[in-house]
Image (cartoon, rainbow, N blue to C red):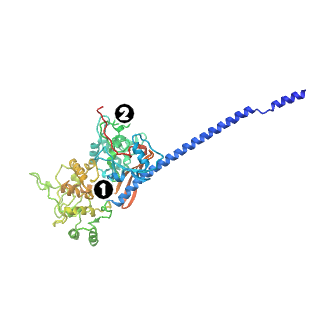
């Protein structure tokens, strides 16, 4: 009996607890399910991340395809401004991959207001090239810009900087800007030496900032470097155009309602950066990118051969030979055109006062002014370009510039020859120019900075070029042949202007019809003949979409009457 009782108790202790095991199994199953769900969620998240990154990369590649398209155009038609300045058919919604007019495009067009996309549609990737439109500020321009359409920070004079800042920076109570501080500080930043200008800044000023740094005392590397210079706040450099699209967006015209801050005046302050560059280089080549013939080359037989190869007129070639054989050198290619008559003197003015201080008498050695095309001087009287820069920077003071022919023989060139002369000939020993302003593309604000040019003349240039074809604007000769400037003024500014460039700024937006991914990139390239060289690259995605590439890019003023 005792044994039976002990056995029964032992059996109960060793009986399996099936209910506890079931609980453990259920917990394990729940943990495994949770783990599987977490893993599935993680895989899904990673997949979406990869898809998003892939789509962003594709948009980026579509944007860069636009830059490659621009490079191809510059290779094919280097002198054709109309081919790259503004061409909506070529640069607005250009197809990179996919089929034109596919379902994705049609679906978006039908639902553009709702901003919906059809991911199931066949992908179609596109690009659009945007550029600021100074003539029509409410509209975008579809193309790109040469850097000679801007003022070069590294060669701009004090007068040019002062005039630009005074013209484009709005003066109001909310943004009190001292132009003297801006100009002096900028010049101190790019100039070597320890002494600061009266309103400028050197190491002592920057060392007291947090964090401290030193003045560069060297040329600017980028325009954005201005943000390090005293007085140049983000508002001064970039203005109200926070997303840098050159268009007046609603958030940029609502005062303090939303970022960025603006004065709600219905006018977009683009900032000074839109008018500045550090890459305004113009190669001394023809419109077809071949080297120009230097009239002052030493080998006269080779000079004649070069002139013949360039297709110059026989009378011009003979005149060049006679001048060079006499030992004289050309001061400018304008020496091939008869000098204009001297300006009429005011009553009571003497002959001596009608000539600039740099005037030489007959038979003396003429010394060329700074930045002249010929730094070696010319024998004879006052020749083309002498004293022009000094006179233009102080226009309205002193005596007018007087030009005389290089020799007693009247040059055979005419206005009809001028486009070929300016395109194919040079007296410049350097292979390129720095800081010249493109009169065919620069905005009016930049044109007005050309030394010697008045605001009315800048307006006349901006108005006249709209009516001209690209071939008419291939050289600066159109300023004279179209009657925009007289010959004296034309000769006066010739060394400051150009109609071509080798540096180009391209902003490209890549996107697709079936999804809302957009990528913005900006690149500055230099064309060395057919070879492009990247000078500056910037990804603008962090500035936001900024554009509506699916429709016409236009900004209307807000209705303030409500």
How packed mark 2 is, by other alpha carbons closer than 10 Å (few <14, some 14-19, many 20 or more), is few
Give the residue pinned by disc 1.
81
Quarter holding the N terminus is top right
In the orientation shown, which residue stands out farthest toward the left? 347
Foreground of the two, 212 or 403: 403
The label number, if any, that marks residue 364 in the structure image: none
The image quarter in which residue 4 lies: top right
Label 1 to label 2, Cα distance in Å? 41 Å
Foreground of the two, 418 or 253: 253
The label number, if any, that marks residue 257 in the structure image: 2
The image quarter in which residue 198 lies: top left
Quarter holding the C terminus is top left
Q: Is residue 382 above or below residue 29?
A: below
Question: Contact (CB < 8 A) between labels 1 and 2?
Answer: no
On the image, the x and y values in percent for residue 314 come to: 22, 70
How packed mark 1 is, by other alpha carbons closer than 10 Å (few <14, some 14-19, many 20 or more), is many
Element assignment for label 2: loop
Residue sitting at x 34%, y 57%: 502
Determine whether, in the image, residue 401 is placed left or right of residue 180: left
Evaluate whether residue 76 shows in this view. yes
On the image, the x and y values in percent for residue 301 come to: 27, 73
Foreground of the two, 220 or 249: 249
Determine whether, in the image, residue 468 is placed left or right of residue 342: right
On the image, the x and y values in percent for residue 297 come to: 28, 67
Determine whether, in the image, residue 122 is placed left or right of residue 464: right
On the image, the x and y values in percent for residue 2 come to: 90, 27
Tell me which numbered mark, 1 or 2, is placed earlier along the sequence: 1
**How many numbered circles are shown?**
2
The image quarter in which residue 17 lies: top right
Element assignment for label 1: helix
């Amino acid at each position: 009996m005792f044994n039976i009782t002990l056995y029964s108790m032992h059996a109960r202790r060793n009986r399996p607890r099936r209910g506890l095991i079931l609980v453990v199994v259920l917990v394990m199953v729940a943990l495994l399910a949770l783990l599987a769900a977490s893993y599935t969620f993680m895989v899904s998240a990673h997949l979406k991340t990869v898809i998003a990154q892939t789509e962003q990369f594709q948009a980026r590649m579509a944007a860069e395809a636009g830059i490659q398209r621009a490079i191809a155009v510059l290779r094919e038609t280097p002198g054709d401004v109309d081919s790259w300045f503004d061409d909506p058919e070529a640069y607005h919604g250009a197809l990179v991959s996919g089929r034109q007019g596919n379902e994705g495009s049609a679906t978006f067009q039908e639902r553009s207001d709702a901003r919906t996309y059809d991911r199931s549609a066949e992908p179609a990737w596109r690009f659009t090239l945007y550029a600021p439109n100074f003539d029509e500020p409410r509209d975008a321009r579809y193309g790109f810009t040469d850097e000679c359409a801007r003022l070069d920070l590294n060669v701009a004079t004090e007068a040019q900087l002062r005039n630009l800042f005074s013209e484009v920076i709005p003066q109001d109570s909310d943004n009190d800007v001292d132009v003297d501080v801006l100009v002096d500080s900028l010049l101190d930043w790019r100039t070597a030496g320890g002494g600061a200008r009266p309103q400028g800044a050197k190491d002592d000023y920057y060392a007291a900032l947090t964090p401290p740094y030193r003045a560069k005392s060297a040329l600017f590397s980028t325009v954005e470097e201005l943000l390090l210079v005293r007085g140049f706040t983000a508002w001064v450099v970039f203005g109200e155009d926070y997303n840098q699209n050159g268009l007046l967006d609603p958030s940029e015209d609502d005062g303090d309602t939303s970022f960025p801050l603006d004065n709600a005046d219905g006018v977009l302050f683009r900032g000074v950066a839109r008018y500045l560059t550090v890459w305004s280089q113009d190669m001394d080549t023809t419109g077809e990118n071949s080297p120009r013939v230097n009239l002052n080359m030493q080998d006269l037989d080779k000079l004649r051969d070069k002139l013949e190869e360039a297709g110059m007129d026989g009378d011009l070639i003979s005149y060049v030979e006679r001048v060079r054989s006499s030992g004289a050198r050309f001061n400018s290619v304008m020496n091939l055109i008869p000098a204009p008559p001297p300006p009429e003197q005011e009553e009571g003015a003497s002959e001596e006062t009608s000539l600039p201080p740099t005037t030489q008498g007959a038979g003396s050695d003429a010394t060329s002014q700074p930045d002249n095309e010929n730094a070696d001087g010319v024998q004879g009287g006052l020749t083309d370009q002498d004293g022009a820069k000094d006179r233009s920077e102080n226009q309205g003071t002193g005596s007018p510039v007087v030009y005389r022919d290089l020799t007693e023989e009247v040059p055979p060139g005419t206005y009809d020859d001028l486009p070929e002369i300016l395109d194919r000939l040079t007296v410049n020993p350097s292979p390129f120019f720095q800081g010249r302003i493109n009169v065919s593309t620069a905005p009016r604000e930049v044109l007005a900075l050309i030394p010697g040019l008045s605001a009315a003349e800048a307006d006349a240039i901006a108005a006249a070029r709209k009516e001209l074809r690209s071939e008419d604007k291939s050289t600066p000769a159109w300023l004279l042949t179209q009657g925009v400037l007289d010959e004296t003024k034309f000769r006066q500014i010739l060394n400051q202007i150009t109609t071509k460039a080798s540096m180009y700024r391209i902003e490209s937006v890549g996107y697709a019809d079936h999804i809302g991914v957009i990528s913005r990139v900006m690149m500055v390239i230099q064309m060395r003949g057919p070879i492009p060289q990247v000078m500056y690259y910037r990804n603008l995605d962090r500035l936001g979409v900024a554009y509506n590439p699916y429709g016409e890019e236009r900004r209307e003023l807000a209705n303030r009457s409500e």
